[in-house]
Amino acid sequence: MRENNADIVIIGASHAGGEVGFRLRQGGFAGSIALLGAEAYLPYQRPPLSKAFLAGEVSAEALLIRPAAAYEKANINWHPSTLVTAIDRVAHRLTLAPEQHFTYGKLILATGGRARTLPLPGAGLAGIHTLRSIADVEALRADFVPGQRLVIVGAGYIGLEVAAVAVKQGLDVEIVEFAPRALARVAGPELSAFYEAVHRKAGVRFRFNTGVDGFTGEAGRVQAVRCADGTVLPADLVLVAAGLVPNVELAQGAGLAVGNGIVVDEFCRTSDPDILAIGDCTEFPLPFLGKRVRLESVPNAQEQARVAASVLAGAPSAYNAVPWFWSDQYDRKLQSVGLSQGYDQVVMRPPRTPEGFIAFYLREGRVIAADCVNAIAEFGAAKKLVAEKTVVDPTLLADPEIDLKSLLLAKA
């Protein structure tokens, strides 16, 4: 039986997991660092999976956040295809499959999440896909044949991004969504209507206000999707884009506090003083909102990696970032900042370009979120308005002739 050890062990070769290792080195940490990843790949960018990588525009190698040489130079010991099955908090010992152990001084959980599956009749048929990893995309891409009928379950960002790639490659695309509109969980009605119109113009069909009851097939392969409203949609392939499930089982099995993710404080510390957690798998206090949340974003992964490294370096610096996200669909780039839940007013800023606009969300006169479509030049100022929860005259905010930076200067 093999025994390994490191001063700091990171479980999860995710964006957060890779980043925290380098942050530790940049902060002067000289001890041993081990990075344990379940996949065969070094940490890689996941946002392009449903866009450029699915379209075949970039290679798997190009997705890597850093090359292997960078890990060697930083003396970060990478263990690929390594599955951790249990944490012994008393002995500071991890059980690995098969028949291996790893001891740690401090432990960082960066276990991320997995694509949600649907426990429905026929869910195991060939041709039904989810999208979370390079392997997932390679399997989906193999079924991308012009003329094939693709049914996507879920009109969130992943579903819409895949739809954009699929119709451009000649597939017939229909999206089934339980909610009454696209992006209902993450965006206001104005943005939903805009993206629905863009997709319909490209040939995507939508079926809202209905769920999925199951899948039917022949010879082990999917042939149709049964909707909750009784409709049967012919399908040559299916993508289930129903969100992400945080990987909390290791933490739960070790007796750590778990809620909507692994529970951590503003310093990414779990209920065990020797274990931290970062990234998509965590539930944490977000000062910007004044409540606990779980966020799925690259900026959040980077910020929590910074926080965790500061704690382990002995100079703790609490989480205090404003959440932001992005999505690319067709030639429209969406950049969102803040969280619009609870807004009481929407201010639309007309386009400076034919396909661009900004939707500002206000609560009691303060800017709490913004959705910027093809408005890259204005995103920085919009981000500051949101970060400072600026009180702004809606008339000025809506006027494209008014420079957003001047509204910040006026506040100062």
Image (spheres, grey):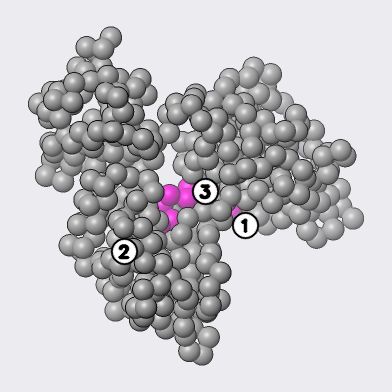
Percent x, y of residue 271 = 72, 33
Q: Is residue 50 magenta?
A: yes
Q: CA distance from mark 3 to mark 2?
A: 34 Å
Q: Which residue is the extreme one toward the right? A: 1
As drawn, is 257 to the left or to the right of 1? left
In x, y percent, where is residue 283?
58, 38
| Residue hosting label 2 | 208
Dot 2 crowding, Cα within 10 Å, few <14, some 14–19, many 20+: some
The chief SS type of the magenta part is loop
Res 28 seen here: no
Q: In this rendering, does residue 288 appear at all? A: yes
Q: Along the horizontal axis of the image, is 36 left or right of 222?
A: right
| Dot 3 amino acid type | Tyr
| Residue annotated with mark 1 | 40
- Mark 3 → mark 1, Cα distance in angstroms: 11 Å
Q: Nearer the viewer, mark 3 or mark 2?
A: 2
Say which element carries label 1: loop
Q: Which residue is found at the position 19% from the left and 57% from the top?
A: 197
Residue toward you, 208 or 87: 208
> Which residue lies under the disc numbered 3?
44
x 43%, y 56%: residue: 49
**Dot placed on the residue nearer the N-terminal end, 3 or 2:** 3
The type of residue carrying mark 1 is Ala
Tell me which segment is drawn in magenta: 40-54
Q: Quadrant of the N terminus?
A: bottom right
Residue drawn 26% across the image and 68% down it:
205
Q: Is residue 382 above or below residue 207?
A: above
